[in-house]
Image (cartoon, grey):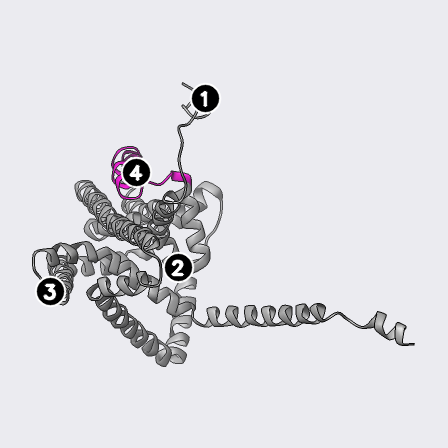
Amino acid sequence: MEEGNNSNHLPPWYVKAIWYAIFAVTLSIAAWYIALQLTDLMVTVAICFFLAFSIEPIVNKLAARGWKRGLATLFVYVVGIGAVTAFLVLFGLVFFQQVVDLIAEIPNIYDVIRSFFDETFSITLPEPSVLMDQYLNDAVSLLANGVIGVINTFLGMVFGALTVLLVTFYLVVDGPRFRSVVCSMFSQRRQREILDVWEVAINKTSSYIISRLILALVCGTATTIFLLIVQVPNGLALGIFTGFVSAFIPTIGTYIGGVLPVAVAFGASPIQGVATLAFIVAYQQIENLTIEPRISAKAMELNTAVSFLSVLAGAAVLGPIGAFLALPVAATLKAFVGTYLRRTEVVTSKLTDGGN
């Protein structure tokens, strides 16, 4: 009997392994739950670091000239807010009026689109009155049931914006001290690597913002001038919309930005619609082949396929914010990997020289 009991008795290491496995599973579930609860906080932190990396090169240059970091950061904030305010003062009223006119033209644009589908494809779209009645009913219902929700959302956005600005301010002001604290946890050799990668992240992020602003300015200006020349209604609003959407929405922003001006132009007349469509297509080809590669190559130094996959991965993890932050993160990771991988000379082959 004793021998039988001994044979069925579990060894001590087996029991410990079971308890370790239970502990690991429990810890993983708890960590996953906490991560889900802190998703919004992590997004906020990512945005704060992104903004801090964007403005820190300017603050560092001012600090090198003798400015205190707090004063230099405040100066950047004031200039940025002043630039936005000046833009709104100069173009805000005209832009707002054109947006109002554009909204008023939506029924006419819908009538043109409806007639086109009916005559070309024999597809009958719903009457505008039906859509308007449904829209008004939904709007009244949402307004009656969601006033408090709208107010809470607005207050939440204001609080979130103030939080981001405040945290970003302290990240920039205390940047050297924060990096010193992080580096103190590692050996001096690792500290140099960490600081190198940190510097690359700052340079890539600031270069990314500058490149996007340049592309938005060029695209918006060119589109606005063309729309005004061909006398498409609300050309200024449509040009600004096209420039910023095409520049700041990764991958598909070009197509989203061009849809609205083309639709409005077709609503005005078929000739204007065809001309606008031709311009959008031609401009995007010129930008993709000449302007964008030169700017992005200096800013990101990323392969096109890598950029596209990075945007998809960022969107899958954090949605639109992740898609926007994907390119500078990918460029930083590339630089980080490059510090640990030793590159050697590549052998000559038609697979590496483009078949030449």
Identify the mark nearer the N-term, 3 or 4. 3
The three-letter amino acid code for the residue at tag 1 is: Ser
The three-letter amino acid code for the residue at tag 3 is: Lys
Distance CA(mark 2)–CA(mark 1) = 62 Å
Identify the mark nearer the N-term, 1 or 4. 4
- Which mark is nearer the camera, 2 or 1? 1
Which element type, helix, strand or loop, lies under badge 4? helix
Residue most toward the top?
Answer: 356
Identify the mark nearer the N-term, 4 or 2. 2
Q: Position of residue 316 (x, y in %)?
A: 46, 56
Q: Position of residue 106 (x, y in %)?
A: 32, 56
Q: Which residue in the structure is indicated by mark 1?
A: 349
Q: Which residue in the structure is indicated by mark 2?
A: 128
Image: magenta residue range: 281-305
The three-letter amino acid code for the residue at tag 4 is: Gln
Which element type, helix, strand or loop, lies under badge 2? helix
Q: Residue at x 23, y 65 (%)?
A: 177
Name the quadrant of the N terminus: bottom right
Binning the other alpha carbons within 10 Å of mark 3 as few (below 14), some (14 to 19) or many (20 upward) gives some
Which element type, helix, strand or loop, lies under badge 3? loop
Distance CA(mark 3)–CA(mark 4) = 43 Å
Q: Which residue in the structure is indicated by mark 3?
A: 68
* Tag 1–tag 4 contact (CB < 8 Å): no
Distance CA(mark 1)–CA(mark 3) = 55 Å
Q: Is residue 233 visible?
A: no
- Which mark is nearer the camera, 4 or 2? 4
